Image: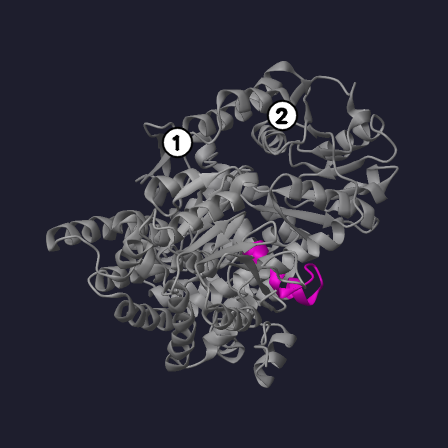
Amino acid sequence: MLMEGNSIRVENLGSGMYELVFDQKDSDINTLSQAALDDLRQAVDAIKGQSDLRGLLLSSAKKEFIVGADITEFSKMFDAEQAFITDYLAKINTLFNEIEDMPCPTVVAINGICFGGGFELALTADYRVMAQGAKVALPEVKLGIYPGWGGTVRLPRLIGIDNANEWICGGTENKADAALKVGAVDAAVAPDDLRDSALRLLNDCADGVFDYQARRTEKQTPVLLNNMEQMMAFESARGVIGAKAGPHYPSPMLVLKTIEKTCTMTRDKALLIEAKGFAKLATNSVTASLVGLFLKDQHVKRVAKKYTAEAEPVKQAAVLGAGIMGGGIAYQSASRGTPILMKDINEPALQLGLDEATKLLGGQLKRGRIDAAKMAKVITQITPTLSYGDFDRADIVVEAVVENVNVKKSVLADVEKNISADSVLASNTSTISITELATALERPEQFCGMHFFNPVHRMPLVEVIRGEKTSEATIARTVAYAQAMGKTPVVVNDCPGFLVNRVLFPYFGGFSGLLESGADFVKVDKVMERFGWPMGPAYLLDVVGIDTAYHADAVMAEGFPDRMSHDNENAIDRMFKLERFGQKNAKGFYRYENDKRGKPKKLADEAVPELLSDVLGDAREFTNEEIIERMMIPLCIETARCVEEGIVASPAEADIGLIYGIGFPPFLGGAMNYMDQMGMQTFCDMADKYTDLGPMYVPTETMREMAANGGKYFPVAG
């Protein structure tokens, strides 16, 4: 053993061949933490000191190669000055350059995941051999930054500007065949052959079969494109990538700018430009929000892991109700490997559910995500039925019938008699109290809420709702099932609307209040979309369904009469009265026509202003700032209430719930992060301008205390 640290060891393979093995002792994965980088420094020094050095193999003893930098550690640096960050990057680039400039050929054997800094390290080698099933990626743009350890410099020289723009700006994960096709790796082999193949290539390089020095020259000199070719490559990319990124996410466009500027430079000059751009992004508020979002997601996963540690896996599921929602649940369960029974009271309803699942699978087939055999296999995992015949085999049953408390109680009581004594029963309700529904059951401890969001296959969140008598074992199994379906479960306590809808309806209340004050709903939509929401409130109501929103509003008003009830008829009430239910019947605040792909296209409806004339205030102009404040303040205060009341266990889970559940702008990091970045005193001062609008705009006492003491929901670690 030439060298051994906590993260890396160097083995002498004989005949001048050495192997640098990543094998982090205190973890199941390898990360490029500061300790690992220190080990790498020692390893490189030790290897360079060997007089018989003929070749270096880099490999991993873990299931994955290197998953990336340690983001919990790395992100602390983002609070530093830009000059400090560029100096830090210069030290790492010096180390990576020494690997690239080794006095011998270098080959990397890539197994499993090789992301971020791990892939940047792999790019320093002369050749890369990749196992089938492994993945490589530079996903840094998803955190608001870009590759800072040479990724924007080396990758374009290996795979070309167009491919590099796509890989880096999109943060895409790439399998072995795709990586081989563009030249990011030099061979794709069976996992069992990986090390032997990499060693053979290394020996061939040492014996002069391959000119590894030519490969180095390629990576360290300017890209071989003339001025016209460069201009065309970047101009075409700017429009596409700029449209995808939008105005709130600066990193993809700065990637383009950096690659455009550095592609005509030598390696060392290019690395300096890359470092300056990285430092600029690292100190941006968007980066702080997106890194924070990543850490919150990790926290939510750890919480779920604690719940599921003792949970029995769900081997058979069932869903009651075969409409669009039931069909979506059935599709999601079956496509992720859990067979599911789908029951309804008549054949047409069952066919509707099957049609929904088949449509979703057909879309996957058309996009090449699955083949015909996979599609057939998933369909066979969905068993339609008109009876409870096989329900005693189900480990969990999800009730997804109409959102009516009496209907749900009746159906739940009925199904409970037809399932096994240890089966879990869950209700897919968006607002109705789980504790209230449980009064119809003999085993309330085995009942909880499992609130899916529409469309099920796209929305990542599932709220798992604990009633007063719900057992921890029931929560654990439901969380495990949500995870098995590929969803992010957040456990919340029972209250009207739970977390997401309880927070969403004050947002809708702010919208109704704006209209009553004379705002134009079209302008409100445009302002909130520019602010960062995927759709404005009027459009969102049309998508949710005006009838659904109307009934949910009544539940919320009954639950929180001090701030969510209203005596006067508002725009939502009027739309419901006129049976303008939104997309589901092609008319709401907007009208809808199907486009060529069969998807509803939003169009202006000139009749709407007149239909709403007597429930709207006298028309007046609002500034964009006023609209944003009147929409966001109620949502943020209600989120704070949910945390204070223990409806949700932590600010992190609250923020994840809003981002994954209703599309809260990710670049803002969630409602709690939004208030933190603004400062609680500033937020309270802003809210105090609108106290005449009622209790929805009044911060809580805890928020006032935080304002006075400079408190934050996410204190910066010292």
Q: Nearer the viewer, residue 186 or 89?
A: 186
From the viewer's perspective, is 445 left or right of 50? right
Mark 2 element type: loop
User: Circle 2 is placed at which residue position?
Assistant: 322
Q: Which residue corresponds to the image point at 75% horizontal and 18% vertical from the top-left?
A: 387
Residue 446 x, y percent position in the rendering:
83, 41
Residue 531 lies in the magenta-colored region: no
| Location of mark 1 (residue) | 599
Q: State the residue in front, 619 or 253.
A: 253
Residue 534 image offset from top left, x and y in percent? 42, 50
Residue 610 in sight from this viewpoint: yes
Amino acid under disc 2 = Ala
In the rendered structure, does residue 651 fall within the stretch colored magenta? yes
Above or below for 508 versus 651: above
Q: Foreground residue, 409 or 90? A: 90
Which one is in front, 334 or 522? 334
Point out the tag, 1 or 2, that comes first from the N-terminus: 2
Residue at 56%, 62% (x, y): give it: 31
